Amino acid sequence: MSNSEYRVLLLEDNAVNALMVRKMLERVDSPKFEVSHADSLLKALDLLSHGSFDAALVDLNLPDSDGIETFLAIQRNAPGLAVVILSGMDDEALSMKAVELGAQDYLSKTELNAHELVRAVQYGVIRSRKSADPRAQQTGSVLAVMGSKGGVGVTTLACHLAREWKRQTGETVLLTGVDENAAGAAYLMKATTQYTLGDAAQNLHRLDGDLWKAYVFTAPDGVDVLPPPGAGTFTGPLEAERIRHVLRFARGNYQRVVLDLGVLTAMSLGLLEEATEVVVVASEDLPALWEAGRLLKRLTQVGIPAESIRLVLNQKKKRGGVPVAELEKALGHAVFGSVTAAGEEHDELMAAGKFVDEKSAVRKDVVKIVAKMLGKDAPEPGGGFRFSRLVRG
């Protein structure tokens, strides 16, 4: 946007006040204002995630957020945005506190006029641009792992991928999942935290670095785990919109997020737009392969680029099985990699919260898959890439 045109997010739950502010800005000849209105914090965060704004006019007291937490939620989700507080009669102390914490200005609703409103937006934008930290907009990538049907080992593979990504790159990695009925990765990774993705979603309005640290469990190998909702106390039905914003918060704090989506549901489908890559997991049995074909078509139909979909055959038989070339022809999609079926020894190791044996076929297969994602030759299972060792010091 130029200095003669501004995109403004108006966060105000009172319809009369919102209309008054919009009319004031629309009547200004220059600069021009394009105003998008939200009457709740959740709607505001959704607008921020899908568009670019120069400034936000924010009422602190909303149906789903109250007081200074409203400003902090906007600040965390749009760190470079110029925020001007619209203060009610009893909100002056809160508004001043928001300015101390980084808001550009505050205006009283009872004394609001077009001149002061335009001036506050223009000056706020100038100040925020001067102090903007270019690193604040950096975001990590999301690897979504989804099964063609239940029982193909999605959660186990997600744990393997998260751990191996951490080992090969040294990057910050988060592992989480959306299952509302099972502990999933929390059990396999032996996570001891009592909190889950559901808790983070319910407390979106006050989610910050300190609260996040209290929620996650850091495994011995350095992977952070935020257990799926099924691992904790029932917090009510999950909303995909809230989960999306938790993932966006996580992307600002991790270089890689591994997301266990389970099987295709309305929830998992709604979260796919957050993914930069999708791993589709199938076993070699015919029902799983048939469902894999349907899932691959569905993903492309909803706009997931075919080149971002990684088809992985899990629990692959050591002998026999369907030739890969025949599978690719039948499914119309290349097989990205395969993981050999493991025996009881593997299950016992995972039950103990350990990775598979260093020399096992499963470990070697996972190493190859992650290396291929990185565009590198596979390192030895016990070693790492040269740049990985440098990152870890």
Image: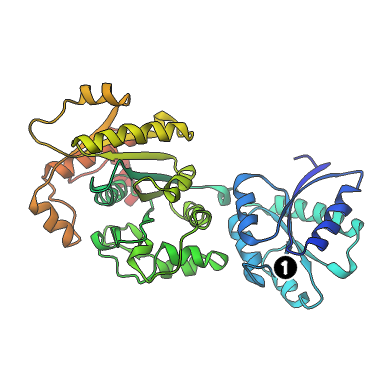
Helix, strand or loop status at disc 1: helix
- Work out whether 136 lies above or below 102: above
In the rendered image, which quarter contains the N terminus? top right
Of residue 353 and residue 305, the one placed in the foreground of this image is 305
Q: Is residue 393 visible?
A: no
| Image coords of residue 198 (percent x, y) | 43, 64
Q: In which quadrant of the rendered view does residue 215 lie?
A: bottom left
Q: Where is mark 1, residue-wise?
A: 99
- The answer to whether 326 appears left or right of 387 in the picture is left
**Amino acid identity at mark 1:** Val
Q: In which quadrant of the rendered view does residue 141 lie?
A: top left
Q: In which quadrant of the rendered view does residue 44 lie?
A: bottom right
| Image coords of residue 304 (percent x, y) | 45, 34
- Work out whether 79 lies above or below 195: above
Q: Is residue 264 visible?
A: yes
| Image coords of residue 178 (percent x, y) | 39, 56
- How many numbered marks does the figure carry? 1
| Image coords of residue 267 (percent x, y) | 44, 51
- What crowding class fits label 1: few (fewer than 14 Cα within 10 Å), some (14-19), or many (20 or more)? some
- The answer to whether 23 appears left or right of 163 in the picture is right
Could you tell me which residue is drawn at 60 percent across and 59 percent down?
42
Could you tell me which residue is drawn at 56 percent across and 68 percent down?
206
Of residue 302 and residue 97, the one placed in the foreground of this image is 302
- Work out whether 330 lies above or below 231: above
- The answer to whether 385 appears left or right of 4 in the picture is left
- Work out whether 366 lies above or below 221: above
Could you tell me which residue is drawn at 15 percent across and 51 percent down?
356
- The answer to whether 368 appears left or right of 103 in the picture is left
